[in-house]
Image (cartoon, rainbow, N blue to C red):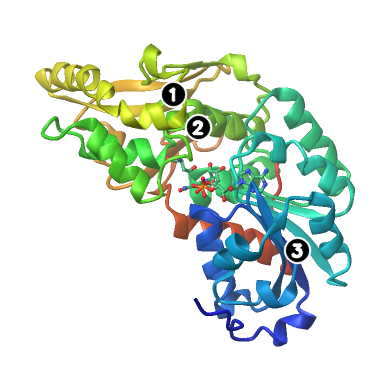
Amino acid sequence: MSALPTAGAAAQAGAPVALVLFGAGVVGGAFLDLLATPAAAPVRLVGLADSRRQLTDPSLLAARNRRDQLRRAGTARDDAALLGALAASGARHRVLVDATASPALAARHADWMAQGYAVVTANKSLAGGALPGWRTLERALAAGAYYGDAATVGAGLPVLSTLRRLRRCGDALLTLEGVFSGSLSYLFNQYDGSQPFSALLLRARELGYTEPDPREDLSGGDVARKLLILARSAGFALGTDEVRVESLVPEALRGVDLETFLARLGELDAPLAERHAQAAARGHVLRFLARLNQRGQAHVGLVEVSATHPAARLFGTDNQFALTTTRYHTQPLVIQGPGAGPEVTAQALLGDVLALLDGSARVAG
Ligand SMILES: NC(=O)C1=CN([C@@H]2O[C@H](COP(=O)(O)OP(=O)(O)OC[C@H]3O[C@@H](n4cnc5c(N)ncnc54)[C@H](O)[C@@H]3O)[C@@H](O)[C@H]2O)C=CC1
Ligand SMILES: N[C@@H](CC=O)C(=O)O
């Protein structure tokens, strides 16, 4: 394996942005690939960590095969050393990028911001988790912190930015509806009963669309987090218990470990084949929808829709967000496009990092 430095590594020594990346999996790996492109020239990686190891050695971080270096030469996890590398960087902007699904790490975001670091995240656990976490985030933002969260909804589709722009102009969200999961969109756009649902799920996982534990997608938990992030960003301070969620995970598979769940995936097939057949008999299709109504009632679950419903006309990992507002009230404003996948998500992270340079940061609130 090559440990050659990436092109432009020397030039990065004076880069205006220093960055620590948490997570070297599907999204983190794609982000590392993007850091090696000319678009990321202003960015210098000073730390890299997964759940067990970390690197702060500049020569290893400058290598092309940083993930291999992490596996081979990584030292024990110690957040203080990672923050120390950022503090010592001398860079104008110091940013922590969270490409994990760890609630424990997300719980540190506000603390990092209080220490003056910018945070850019694909991890939805803080903004889409328990309401006190959202309140902590709001306080950090009110104090002037930077929180790049574009990747948390629609894998970077311009949904949160649009919502905030409307709000700034005095517009108000009335209702929100759509397909907020790339993996569930991919699954139900294709599922026609001709092959087992579990086979499609394995494919979605291979393609990097699912959460590290696909039950987060199938349970509706990931969609509920996105609905909460959107609702809260629109001014509805909803708690997690205020979203009614219909899970597709059979009771017997909810408490088992991930390995056992994957070994027993076939247990998903019969119930979903039956739901599909019932819908098809009525000329309908199944879509996993999220809805927020004007009274702030939120619901996430599998719904039968007619072939003419907007959600019936999606492809691949398409997400769809239909926003009805006080000014977009005759027809909703609709944002649609691929809503999962390592490349687009990594790009959303890089976009939020580079936005530090032009002051066009979008933050929660
Ligand atoms: N896959 C996609 O299309 C999208 C994913 N996301 C989000 O991106 C995040 C990452 O997803 P994936 O890359 O698919 O997961 P993954 O399971 O492939 O990678 C997660 C990485 O986080 C590391 N990690 C876990 N706890 C850690 C800790 N405490 N400190 C440092 N590293 C830690 C793991 O070792 C692993 O390297 C998730 O929050 C997901 O919701 C967001 C938008 C789209
Ligand atoms: N697992 C998620 C990835 C993006 O958040 C999804 O399927 O949408």
Q: Quadrant of residue 61?
A: bottom right
Residue at the image point whose x is 65% and y is 59% from the top: 352
Q: Amino acid at mark 1?
A: Ser
Disc 2 marks which amino acid? Asp
Which comes sooner in the sequence, label 1 or label 3?
A: 1
Q: Is residue 153 shown left or right of residue 265?
A: right
List the single residue furthest toward the front: 72
Across and down, in percent, residue 167 comes to: 66, 40
Judging by the rendered image, the residue that carries numbered circle 1 is 219
Q: Is residue 56 left or right of residue 143?
A: left
Q: Is mark 2 within 8 Å of ligand 2?
A: yes
Can the viewer see residue 123 in this picture? Answer: yes
Residue shown at 10% from the left, 18% from the top: 281
- Residue ID for mark 2: 222
Numbered mark located on residue 43 in the image:
none
In the rendered image, is residue 360 in sight? no
Give the position of the C terminus as an image quadrant: top right
Q: Horizontally, is 282 left or right of 60 in the view?
A: left
Which of discs 1 and 3 lies nearer the camera? The answer is: 1
Could you classify mark 3 by the number of other residues whose Cα lies within 10 Å: few (under 14), some (14-19), or many (20 or more)? few
Query: Do the residues bearing badges 1 and 3 touch, measured as CB atoms within 8 Å?
Result: no
Q: CA distance from mark 1 to mark 3?
A: 38 Å
In the picture, the disc for residue 359 is 3
Question: Nearer the N terminus, badge 3 or badge 2?
Answer: 2
Residue occupying the point 82% across, 63% down = 86
Task: Identify the element where label 1 is drawn.
Answer: loop
Give the answer, above or below, for where 234 lies relative to 345: above
Q: Residues within 10 Å of mark 1 (few under 14, many from 20)?
A: some
